[in-house]
Image: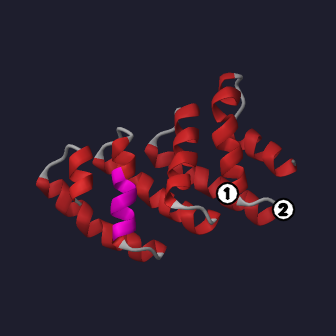
Amino acid sequence: MTDLKKVIDASEISFENFRKSSYDIAREIGVTAQTIVSAASEWGKLGYNLEESTELAKSSAIYVNVGDVDAATATSDLVSVLKAFNKEASESIDVVNVLNNISNKYAVSAAELGEILKKSSSALAISGDTMENIVAMGAAM
């Protein structure tokens, strides 16, 4: 929690509520509470507030599980998509769901799709392409 408090400005009550919810989130996903706290700290370093960081930490942890990626890769992949397509923290789970669904249906992993998105999202978003189209192109490769 110390690292989280260093990077996010919130009240002690908010941090205590986060601490309690981190156990519930961890149990729901099947990770440790420390994993959620660490992920939230990483999102906080990127400028997200405590509520957003909590949502993003949950999405990152799910992506780690379904995408077979490490936490740093999950954060990097997700932040690339969120920034390129101006998505809110609450939409991060939608990104994970798209990656997971496509990887379950086609011969491509969520990690491979995440890497494709990380490398191409900014350029293709500028040209008006959508995240779903990029994932579809990646799955077809």
In the rendered image, residue 111, in percent from the top left (x then y), is placed at 67, 57
In the rendered image, residue 85, in percent from the top left (x then y), is placed at 58, 33
As helix, strand or loop, the secondary structure at mark 2 comes to loop
Q: Quadrant of residue 45?
A: top left
Per the image, the residue denoted by label 1 is: 111
Amino acid type, mark 1: Ala
* Residue 107 circle label: 2
Q: Quadrant of residue 55?
A: bottom left
Residue lying farthest left? 12
The residue drawn where x is 39% and y is 47% is 43
Q: Nearer the viewer, mark 2 or mark 1?
A: 1
The residue drawn where x is 33% and y is 61% is 37
* Label 2 Cα crowd, 10 Å radius (few <14 / some 14-19 / many 20+): few
Residue 13 visible in the picture: yes
Residue lying farthest top? 127
Q: Is residue 111 magenta?
A: no
As helix, strand or loop, the secondary structure at mark 1 comes to helix
Left/right of residue 48 with respect to residue 73 in the rendered view: left
* Label 1 Cα crowd, 10 Å radius (few <14 / some 14-19 / many 20+): many
Measure the alpha-carbon separation of dots 2 and 1.
12 Å
In the rendered image, residue 118, in percent from the top left (x then y), is placed at 63, 42
Work out whether 126 lies above or below 23: above
Quarter of the image with the N terminus in it: bottom left
The residue drawn where x is 70% and y is 25% is 128
In the rendered image, residue 63, in percent from the top left (x then y), is placed at 56, 61
Work out whether 68 lies above or below 97: below
Read off the magenta span.
34-41
Amino acid type, mark 2: Ala
Mark 1 and mark 2 in contact (Cβ < 8 Å)? no
Q: Is residue 35 magenta?
A: yes
